[in-house]
Every structure is written in C-alpha cells, then in structure tokens.
Amino acid sequence: MPSSPFSSAQAARDSVAARLRELRLDAGLTMEGLADRCNWNKAKTSRIEASKTAPSDTDIRAWCAACGAGERAADLIAASRSADSMYVEWRRMQRTGLRRLQEASVPLYERTKLFRVYCSRVMPGLLQTEGYAHALLSLIADFRNLPDDVSEAAAARVDRSHIIRDGHHRVVLLVEEDVLTHRIGEDAVMAGQLGYLLTAMSYPAVSLGIIPRAASRVMWGPETFTVFDDKRVHVELLAAKVTVTTPTEVDIYLRAHTRLAEMAVYGPRARSLISRAIDSLG
C-alpha cells in the first residue's frame, strides 16, 4: 500500500507492523536474525516494521514461524488484508472491468439506511441516468485502459440506485453548481440527466442541495465523498478509493457535509439552477 495521508489506512498498516515487531522482540530475535530465518535480507525486515513495505501473506507466515508463533499468522493476515482494503488503487479494483465494481458494492448500499454524499465535478452515482453513467464510465475506461464493459456497468449502476425509491433508505446529496454544467456526454444525455434531477427531487427519500457558484464559502470544495450510516466514508481520489472508518475521521466528513449543506439551496431555488442549466444546452 502506498503511503497515504489518510490516517485510518496508515494506522491500520502501522498496527500490523507493530504486532510483527513485538513478535520478533518476544522471540529474542534481531532484525538480522529474523531475516536469516526467513531467508531474506535485513532491509526487508526493517521496511516491514517501518510500514514502508506491506508484508504478503507468505511473509507473515514466515515471520510468525520464525518467531515460534505460527498460530498468530491467520489473525495478522486478516488484519493486513483489512489495512490493504482501506486504500485501494482504482487500477487494482477495475482491472477486470467496471461492471463487477458496481455489483460488488450492492450489499453495502442495500444495508445502508442513511447516505450523505458530496460531489464537486460529476453527478452522484445514485442519481445518474443510464446515458450519463455510460458517458462517464466510458471516459473512465478510456483513461485507465480498462476492458470495455461500459454498457453493462452503466446498467448495473442504475440498477443499484433503486434504493432511492424503495422507501427503506434516506439519501442526502450535495453537489456544486458546476456539476450541472460540466458536459458529460452529448447535449441530449445532459438534458436527460438534468431532467431526472428534477424528478428525483420529488422522491421522499431524496434531499438534493445545490451549492451555487456565487455562494459565500464557509467550506472549500473537498474531494468527492460518501458517508454510509455515519460509520464509514468512501473518498474518491484520482488514483484510489480510500475507506475511512476511524470515528474521529468519519466525524470530520460529517462536519464537512454539514458545513457544505449550509451553503446549498434547495427546493424552488435548486430547481431554478437546474432549469437554467437545461436552458443553457440550447
């Protein structure tokens, strides 16, 4: 895992490294002694303990065996895999295409009762039409040289979004006004997408706020993020998706969402901004 500024991911990796170091010390081994038993160089031991290199499952088994603690391997491997899942590069998640990625998130979406979403550049996935999703996913697939399953992925994304209409979930979405005018797809695609926003605003489960360009900022526009039931946050970076679960960090995103919401307009004023964007399509 690359070094990450998100402390949830780094703290999880540091915890695994610290537990491995404790095993080595409890076994009375130096770094060099452990390296000899594992048949690798001392530098590798040092890098693993410093969280500069993520240990493989094989590395952890060898480390535990060298320390006479083979029974600890399974727990440490599970912890290491969990740490890896907190910072995942898109190229790793999308290497088999985009459809599976959409489908893999369905269980999380189904069990989440309250979503809080902020988007600064593109429409929230939960409100995307199939045409818009197809256009956006095509850009992503082209940029990342992914297998072409865009049509299937767009359909899966729209199918996943049924939760905003089933009465069992609540969705609070905030978007910057620029989202309404960034041209993703042809004019007809954008017109259909903007029109669907007007429809979705009438759904009982949906609260859509739009932050006008002219709003007096009390919060800068951060990265796109989604909060799931106030317990888990997915942050979308250009290179990776970061999962945040540490309560103090989740709270930061909840506070950010609250501040962003203060700048947003709703109801008729939001509809006016959407209608203006539709008119601008000519």
Image (cartoon, rainbow, N blue to C red):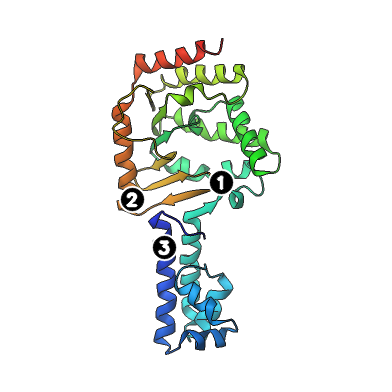
Q: Find disc 2 in the rendering and name its residue.
A: 249
Please give left or right for residue 201 compared with residue 38 in the image. left
Question: Does 39 appear above or below 52?
Answer: below
- Residue 104 marker: 1
Counting residues from the start of the chain, the first of labels 2 and 1 encountered is 1
The CA distance from mark 2 to mark 1 is 24 Å
- The image quarter in which residue 57 lies: bottom right
SS class, disc 3: helix
Q: Position of residue 258 (x, y in %)?
A: 29, 35
Q: Position of residue 198 (x, y in %)?
A: 45, 17
Q: Nearer the viewer, residue 129 or 41?
A: 41
Question: Does 246 appear above or below 36?
Answer: above
- Identity, as a three-letter code, of the amino acid under mark 2: Glu
- Identity, as a three-letter code, of the amino acid under mark 1: Ala
SS class, disc 2: helix
Please give left or right for residue 26 compared with residue 135 in the image. left
The CA distance from mark 3 to mark 1 is 23 Å
SS class, disc 1: helix
Q: Residue at x 36, y 43 (%)?
A: 229
Viewer-nearest of labels 2 and 1? 2
Question: Does 144 appear above or below 128?
Answer: below
- Identity, as a three-letter code, of the amino acid under mark 3: Ala
Tell whether label 1 touches label 2 (CB within 8 Å). Answer: no
- Residue 12 marker: 3
Q: Residue at x 44, y 32 (%)?
A: 120
